[in-house]
Image (cartoon, coloured by chain):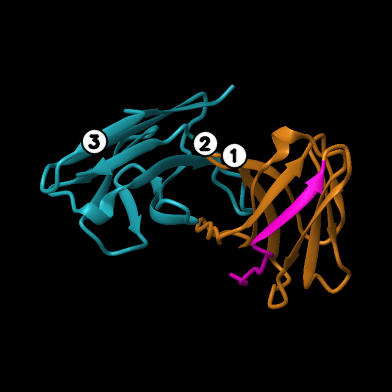
Chain colours: A cyan, B orange
Amino acid sequence: SQTIHQWPATLVQPVGSPLSLECTVEGTSNPNLYWYRQAAGRGLQLLFYSVGIGQISSEVPQNLSASRPQDRQFILSSKKLLLSDSGFYLCAWSKQGSAPYEQYFGPGTRLTVT
Amino acid sequence: DAKTTQPPSMDCAEGRAANLPCNHSTISGNEYVYWYRQIHSQGPQYIIHGLKNNETNEMASLIITEDRKSSTLILPHATLRDTAVYYCIALRSGTYKYIFGTGTRLKVLA
């Protein structure tokens, strides 16, 4: 069966510090991968998605970036965090194909920028 | 992708059916209707999806109107564990962009 991992579960970082969040998927190959952010009390905001290694689509211009160095690894990064980067970060995967497939979400990382 | 509209909140008594509506009046012929839910502090969970026909699985039923302009998610016997935010999404075939709105906050009351 497929499993999606995210770490760390929680993170407290000062403003201006760098960020690296990692997501890995097991039990499937060539998945679509996604990063979302959810601010407190708000809906999910799609940040990035990837349909293959090295292929990243950005949905919202900001100081975050994403990379996909391996087929089942997706990394979210920032060089300098802002207070507004605080939130709940979720990684998700879906199968590829012509029909849209359901997404499966990881447990999330709760980031607090102080 | 079509915009979806949901009521911000609903209450339902435990053991009763919860009927969550979704309006997607601009939906096109190749857009699917997907439902997810998010329990507090967890990632969203897929529930069900459909294109034209009504669908049922072990979690819920999805009723899509004949003109496809609206749909209803039915939880037949709501439990306290069904308290969550429910998201309705219209998703075009071949797209990878899932746009989550603010959803409906369902509270199941004991």
Tag 2–tag 1 contact (CB < 8 Å): yes
A54 sits to left or right of B89: left
Protein chain holding label 1: B
Residue B36: x and y in percent read: 64, 47
* Main secondary structure of the magenta stretch: loop
Q: Indicate the secondary structure of the residue bearing disc 3.
A: strand
At a point 37% along the width and 62% down the height, the residue shown is A59
**Part of the protein shown in magenta:** B1-13
Q: Is residue A73 above or below residue A112?
A: above
Q: Is residue B9 magenta?
A: yes
Viewer-proximal residue, B1 or B63?
Answer: B63
Protein chain holding label 3: A
Neighbor class of circle 3 (other Cα within 10 Å; few <14, some 14-19, many 20+) is few
At a point 65% along the width and 42% down the height, the residue shown is B46
Neighbor class of circle 1 (other Cα within 10 Å; few <14, some 14-19, many 20+) is some
Q: Residue furthest front?
A: B110
Where is mark 1, residue-wise? B39
Residue B53: x and y in percent read: 86, 57
Residue B94: x and y in percent read: 58, 59
Where is mark 2, residue-wise? B42
Where is mark 3, residue-wise? A12
**Pointer 3 and pointer 2 on the same chain:** no
B40 sits to left or right of A74: right
At a point 42% along the width and 51% down the height, the residue shown is A40
